[in-house]
Image (spheres, helix red, strand yellow):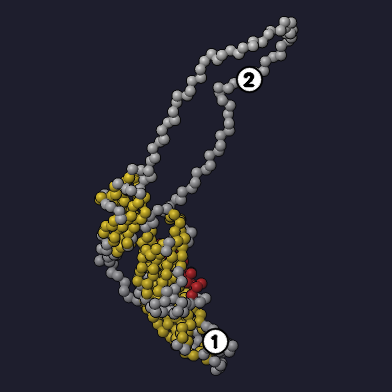
Amino acid sequence: MGRTIVCCGLILVLSSVLVACAPSSTQGPMVWVDQPLDGTRLPLEPQEVTAHGSDADGVTSLEFYVDGTLVGRAPTGGGVLEHATVGWNPSRPGVYTISVKATDSQGNVGPEATSVVTVGELETPPPPTPSAEPTPSPMEPAATPLPPTSTRIPPTTTPIPSTSTPLPPTSTPIPPTSTPPPPSPTIPPPPRIVSFQADPAQLQEGECTTISWRVEGNPTEIYFDGEGATSPDSRTRCPGETTSYTLVARGPGGEVSQSLTVTVIKSPSPTPTEPVDVTPPAITDVTLSSDKLHTLGNCSSTCPCTLFISARITDESGIWAVVAELKLGGSPKGTILMSQSSPDFYEAELGPFTEAGDLVITIIAQDYMANTGKAVRNVTVYDACLG
């Protein structure tokens, strides 16, 4: 069901792009990211990236990148329409840019297609803590004003003479005896894992990878996958399946660790009870609405400038896409996506053309097993209406 949804979406995209303008040989193939789509939110787990490419000279390979780093290169069968899928295992949550480039049989590389996705749950800053309002100290009760004295005290009639000799101090001030506390010892920061990577990070079954790392900050102990190590250092691993490796560094300031996942793509083995389809689609009953075609400007009811081409196309695996490749006077004139008009029948409208010459129409059909069938028809485009 997932493959059907992806392919239907691709055919809709191809309908709008290929009819408008097919890529020339020098521009390279056009390419589309089928999954994951732009703006998708994905869980933090291994993912599959699927893309399609189209070119009149045939698509020979697709290259997949994540944030500018190559994660997979998939050779294709050289057909006009090709697709490929590679595995990708994001190591941490974040926003990633997936890009795909395609190369045709002439060595031309087309413009890249991109898809920006979010992986896992992103951390959000905590809300600001409101400042506390000052509260009165419980040790300081509010002062209560004294009531006014109702009786006035009369003045003393006999003044008291002042003492002429000042009294000596009754005590000697004692200097402070406390000393400031010693400074707290400085705790060094923990070591830093500057780099921890695998080259390559994605393997075919049976291949090996080199895992390397570098740690700074005076580490006292380093362990890779439970083995003692140094910095910088590296190890060779040949995992039989997708495997995660851990690097641990310890020092006076604490311990740090980091994980790395190496993705292993297993080769599919055919099921003995289900033979693989290697038969290309059968193209029969090719018909043209007219055996005469005229250049734009000479159109009439007897001199059509466009024609309809239809064909019956069948295959046991199902038809993935059908296109009509056009060449006029030996020069490519684009590729038109043929739509399904009824079960097993596909059609397209061709023209108008601004120049005369021999028009070669090549119908190309591809099934879900990437088998390709072709059928060729020729039509002459005239400058003047012949009646």
Which sits in the foreground, 134 or 287? 134
**Residues tagged 2 and 1 counted as in contact (Cβ below 8 A):** no
- Residue named by callout 1: 354
* Amino acid type at image mark 1: Thr
- Specify the quadrant that holds the N terminus: bottom left
User: Of label 2 and label 1, which has the lower sequence position?
Assistant: 2
- Image coordinates of residue 327 in percent, x first then y, are 46, 85
Indicate which label's residue lies in the foreground, 2 or 1: 2
Q: Residue furthest front?
A: 165
Disc 1, SS: loop
Which sits in the foreground, 268 or 320? 268
Q: Residue 285 sits in which quadrant?
A: bottom left
Q: Residue 314 sits in which quadrant?
A: bottom left
Crowdedness near tag 1: few (<14), some (14–19) or many (≥20) residues, C-alpha within 10 Å = few
In the image, taking residue 214 as reference, residue 117 lies left or right, namely: right
- Image coordinates of residue 107 in percent, x first then y, are 39, 77
Q: Residue furthest bottom?
A: 386
In the image, taking residue 356 as reference, residue 241 lies left or right, namely: left
Which sits in the foreground, 150 or 346? 150
Residue located 64% across and 11% down the image: 164
- Number of callouts: 2
- Image coordinates of residue 252 in percent, x first then y, are 33, 43
Residue located 53% across and 88% down the image: 355
Q: Residue furthest top?
A: 158
Instruction: Residue 367: tell me if it is visible.
Output: no
- Image coordinates of residue 239 in percent, x first then y, are 27, 58
Note whether 190 is above or below 185 in the view shown: below
* Amino acid type at image mark 2: Ala
Which sits in the foreground, 350 or 94? 94
Residue located 27% across and 63% down the image: 207
Q: CA distance from mark 2 to mark 1?
A: 104 Å
- Residue named by callout 2: 143
